[in-house]
Image (cartoon, coloured by chain):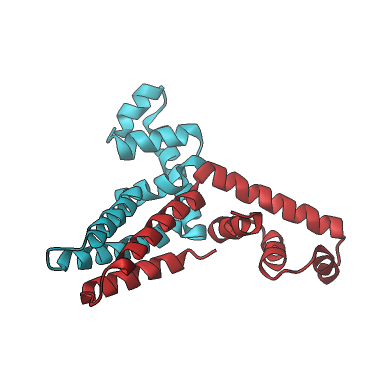
Chain colours: A red, B cyan
Amino acid sequence: MDKITMITLMYDFYGQLLTERQQKFVELYYGNDYSLGEIAENYGVSRQAVHDTLKRAENILRNYENKLGLVHRMLVQRSKLAEAARLLEECDAPLPRQVVRAREIIQEVLDMDRG
Amino acid sequence: MDKITMITLMYDFYGQLLTERQQKFVELYYGNDYSLGEIAENYGVSRQAVHDTLKRAENILRNYENKLGLVHRMLVQRSKLAEAARLLEECDAPLPRQVVRAREIIQEVLDMDRG
């Protein structure tokens, strides 16, 4: 998994434990593709300060994930459910309505954790 | 959901953020059904001290859940998946092997979050 996806997922899980400023910078940089320079200008701080805040936020998120591993657990579950959905997809039509509905539900659960 | 189940689930998610002593007391009291007095005796502290440590641990767990809501998210997902499993259960035999396997996978996922 690439770094940006992993940070986005960790932010989705633990972002509320960051300061407001850290949250804002992570959202702008990783979510909205702002550059360090653009964030610096908008907030009247140095490019280096933005860089440091992002680095610090990233470390905090990684520390929580190292301790709790909840993103990892979700990824394991997501991969299992994707396999279940794929298997149900394979069944020959016409499918019983229960299978159709079960497939929809699995998709709903998968969509809840989108990074 | 009763209080003990909720604390056990929150402990499963956020327990690693408690001190070692808080973890130990939560495990003994909520997991192994020790009394306050028994824990106090084992650790050479007062019953009141055990009570206070447990109360503090509980508050920390609740604060994390209030901020992150990850137990709540898991409960919503678990209830959806239980419904998907129930629907697949309803299908008339003989079931395609994919449905059988998908049901097993859903059960594996549900078992990962047992409180």
**Residue A27 appears in the rendering:** yes
Side of B53 where A49 appears, left or right? right
Q: Nearer the viewer, residue A10 or B92?
A: B92
**Residue B2 appears in the rendering:** no
Residue B28: x percent and y percent?
34, 33
Residue at (44, 51) in percent of width and height: A76
Q: Nearer the viewer, residue A57 or A19?
A: A57
Residue projecting furthest to the front: A92
Residue at (31, 54) in percent of width and height: B105
Side of B107 where B93 appears, left or right? left
Residue at (35, 23) in percent of width and height: B41
Residue at (31, 27) in percent of width and height: B38
Residue B27: x percent and y percent?
36, 36
Side of A1 where A25 appears, left or right? right
| Up/down of B72 relative to A104, above or below | above
In the picture, which quadrant includes the N terminus of chain A? bottom right
Residue B10: x percent and y percent?
41, 50
Give the quadrant of residue A9: bottom right
